[in-house]
Image: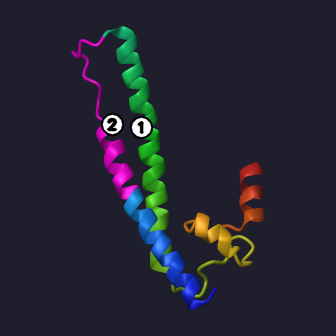
């Protein structure tokens, strides 16, 4: 990966980090406990609890992705950045543009998800 490609990737990572920080604020707000004394009715309360659970899952996943993006940003100038941690082959640049936080090439990612 050349210097220009790394700079483009760095910009994308920074933008994604900013987006995930905004998402985290929203998910944190939506994940607050549902008050038992809230007079919204049984079905509506169950829906609110279910929605809270989904937002908590989204919060956890977004936090995990944010951490991986921040790690990628720190590692972007490392000579090993952009290489699969499994097979040590280069991760295609187009894949990194879409998922700069990925530590795996497409083949290894598929093998991990299948196994």
Can residue 102 be seen in this snapshot? Answer: no
- Which residue: 43% across, 67% down? 15
Nearest to the observer: residue 27 or residue 12:
12
Between discs 1 and 2, the one toward the N terminus: 2
First to last magenta residue range: 20-40
Q: Residues within 10 Å of mark 2 (few under 14, many from 20)?
A: some
Which type of secondary structure does the marked residue at label 2 adopt? helix
Can residue 14 be seen in this snapshot? Answer: yes
Check the image and report above or below for 95 versus 60: below
Residue 30 has which mark?
A: 2
Nearest to the observer: residue 86 or residue 61:
61
- Which residue: 72% across, 56% down? 112
Query: For the residues marked 1 and 2, what is the alpha-carbon distance in whole angstroms?
Result: 6 Å
Residue 1 lies in what quarter of the image?
Answer: bottom right
Give the mark count: 2
Magenta includes 60? no
* Residue matched to label 1: 55
* Image coordinates for residue 94, horizontal then vertical, percent: 67, 71
């Amino acid at each position: 990966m050349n210097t220009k490609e790394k700079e483009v990737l760095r910009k994308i990572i920074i933008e994604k980090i900013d987006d995930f920080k905004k998402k985290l604020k929203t998910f944190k707000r939506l994940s607050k406990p549902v008050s038992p004394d809230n007079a919204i009715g049984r079905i509506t309360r169950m829906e609110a609890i279910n929605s809270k659970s989904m937002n908590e899952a989204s919060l956890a996943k977004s936090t995990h992705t944010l951490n991986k993006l921040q790690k990628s940003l720190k590692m972007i100038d490392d000579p090993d950045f952009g290489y699969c941690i499994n097979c040590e082959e280069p991760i295609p640049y187009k894949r990194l543009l879409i998922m700069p936080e990925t530590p795996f090439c497409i083949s290894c990612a598929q093998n991990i998800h299948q196994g």
